[in-house]
Amino acid sequence: MISRYILLCLLISLALPWHVCAEVVDETELDIQVREISKTLRCTVCQTENIWESGAPLAVQMRGAIRERLTLGHSPEEIHAYFLSRYGDYILMQPPKHGANWLIWLAPFVLLLVGGFFIYSEVRQWVKPTSPQPQDQPPPLDLEARKKIERELQP
Amino acid sequence: MIIEIGHFSVVVAWVLTLLGIGSSVLALRSRNAEWVRVGRIAVTLTFALLFIGMASLVYSFLMRDFSVLYVANNSNSKLPFFYTVAAVWGGHEGSLLLWAFILSSFSTLAVWLHWRTQPTIMPYLIAVESAVMLGFLSLIVFLSSPFARLVPTPLDGKDLNPLLQDPAMVMHPPMLYMGYVGFSIPFSFAMAALFSGRLGEEWIKVTQRWTIFAWLCLTTGILLGGYWAYYELGWGGYWGWDPVENASFMPWLVGTAYLHSVLVQEKRKMFKVWNLLLIIVTFSLSLIGTFLVRSGVLTSVHTFATDPERGLYILIFITTIIGTAFGALIIQSKHLKSQIEMDSFISRESVFLFNNLFFLVAAATVFLGTLYPLMVETFQGGKVTVGPPYYNAVFMPIALGLLFLMGIGPYIPWRKASASNIKKHFLIPTIAGVVTVVLLLISGIYSLYALAGGFVVGFSGSAILVDFGKISQLYANREQVNLFKGFLKAFSANQRRYSSLITHIGVLVLVVGIIASTIYQTEKVVSMKVGDSFSIENYEMKLLNIHQVEGTNWKAQEGVFEVTRDDEVITKLRPQKRVYNASQSPTTESAIHAINMGHIFLTMPDVSPEGVAVARGVINPLILWVWGGGGIMGLGVLLNIFRPRRREE
């Protein structure tokens, strides 16, 4: 890990003009993993903020815990399971898809389908009784009207 | 002394609201117009008295009179002038007073504006507006007074929450409230229509400008809030699906449905019950939104329980308003049969119905998501979080559906669409949608949401642009002028329609901004010392130094970052880590540089005593489209409101 970091720094510093003698820092693989996991976990003392966005001390601690576990070789799933066992479903940024939570996951789409079907059947009823089937051809003109039109079309 | 004058004025205003209701009832009983005049005086005087109430509170803030409890809790002797004024609505009590003040100014305006043209509606209007006002003033007078004294007087105030010490605080809450309260005017006219039995299209035509004005304020308020959260909270996003944001979004969604659906009643005399229902729901959600934000009920049921009196009162107040409104609607609904005549399912009427369906499902989703944690806590005892990942997943399909309808609606005829009509209007947009997708694929964008969004934006956008092109051509030929002048002629010939389409273009621009800045945001967090640099995309950020800076009521560590691309210095960014003196609470002040319609966004959340800074860099592509789109939407609405009046209106 560290050698990769140094290599990256070297590569980037090669691209730099020589008069800029600054050290270049970059996110490591570990940092990115910490970020991805942090974004799925909730800061329990904030209003709907994940522990990545939050600056609360608890969030900082939790990020530390994630980093520690990742360096110990735990997988992201194991880390999730760890936090779930300590805080329950509350710790996840979205309701887990099981049990009663399906209600909230499916409700919008069920509502759209039911509403769409309702509109369809309702509008169909409006169309039928009040007007005849739409006609493709205009109604035939009576003779008098035809003559009138022809007369007016004459220059 | 001054604050007591304010207090007294508000108490008198409370009595006058009772008079407003009483005189209207008497006017209807006795059929004597003099009583309506009394009602008008009551409404007008209420406005004057609430103005005094507001002024006394502002005065106490400016004089830094910490013997007033509300002033002591929400300001401090070192608080800058601007924020001291904004602090008036920084807490629960003051924002209620602001609400009541805006309500009274709108009521007074409506009564004087429509006095001549709507004499029969007037007593009902005054009664309904006064009833809503009574609810708010009772809360202020009996339960949440901003005028209470504090004994003994503290030496200094507790200070305004540092997050609220921002220029946006001056405009954001009043805008939002003007939106909420603005909907009270169409609501009152709707109630007046229900109570008086004058159930035609009159109330909708009269309130048409009020409705779009309210919508404009609410939209501006929401966008302003988003922008504020963006630069102040410093995580690089502008919308967090926070309960407070959701509370303002719900009335917006239903209000937008209402805004569209009234068009059908105006043109086709359909959806009468439906429109009444929509405005009742919109205003109810405005009320719920106001209280949800401040009552704390959403954080947990327990906070609600700590102040049961206030909570119970609010619950009863809202239930009464909603109950009365729905009761009147149900009683009158048998008189509200619409004359429905349609020739085909595929027609503009259907598109409007689907527009309404999508908006309502969106509102129901936000409502359910916001209250679901509360439901789980109450019924199961557990706790659950409904956060942005949920909303993003569920909302995308709904939003895309709405955008698609936006391309169809204005171009499909009423009653029935023929195959040739569909081909004429939608062939080019469909091709444009497909071309957009292909172009996105070529430029290496594979995200499903971005592609779907690209298709819909291409489709709806080109539908509008083709329309603009055709109509400009037509008028240019007819009047023998150039294309641009032709467009202006066409525009002023049908300003209402074309200003709405400009608003639609604004929506599309906004959506492109949202999609790009959400899906293609890149961020990086690094720890660095002075002299170090980090790169994000093509940009190189070098920390030149960290120094102390001081404001009137805060101290900060400021990092100076040099931003370069290809060795070319673009700008210097100065994010701060601030600590406010009075409350000792920290904030991170972001530094932003606009480039290529996007933002380079930099914060410095932490600096250790050893001088190691944590820096967070975010590149938000096309984020300026979000605010620009909002601006175009606003322009469209303004052109709509200030269109010349026509004879038939």
Image: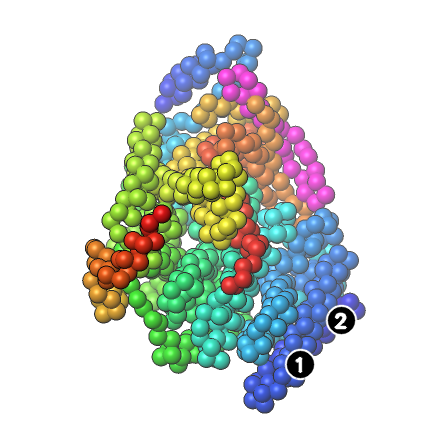
- Of B341 and A57, nearer the camera is B341
Report x, y in % for residue A128: 22, 66
Toward the bottom, the furthest residue is B30
In depth, the one of B544 and B175 nearer the eye is B175
Left or right: where B326 falls relative to B58 = left
Q: Is residue A84 visible?
A: no
Q: Is residue B63 left or right of residue B129?
A: right
Residue depicted at x 72% and y 60%? B58
Is B230 on the left-hand or right-hand side of A131?
right
The answer to whether residue B547 is magenta is yes
Residue A28 place in picture, x, y as percent: 40, 27
> Against A2, is B417 above or below?
below
- Rendering quarter of residue A37: top left
Label 2 close to label 1 by CB (< 8 Å): no
The residue wearing badge 1 is B38
| Mark 2 and mark 1: Cα distance apart in space | 24 Å
Q: What residue occupies the far right of the structure in this picture?
A: B1
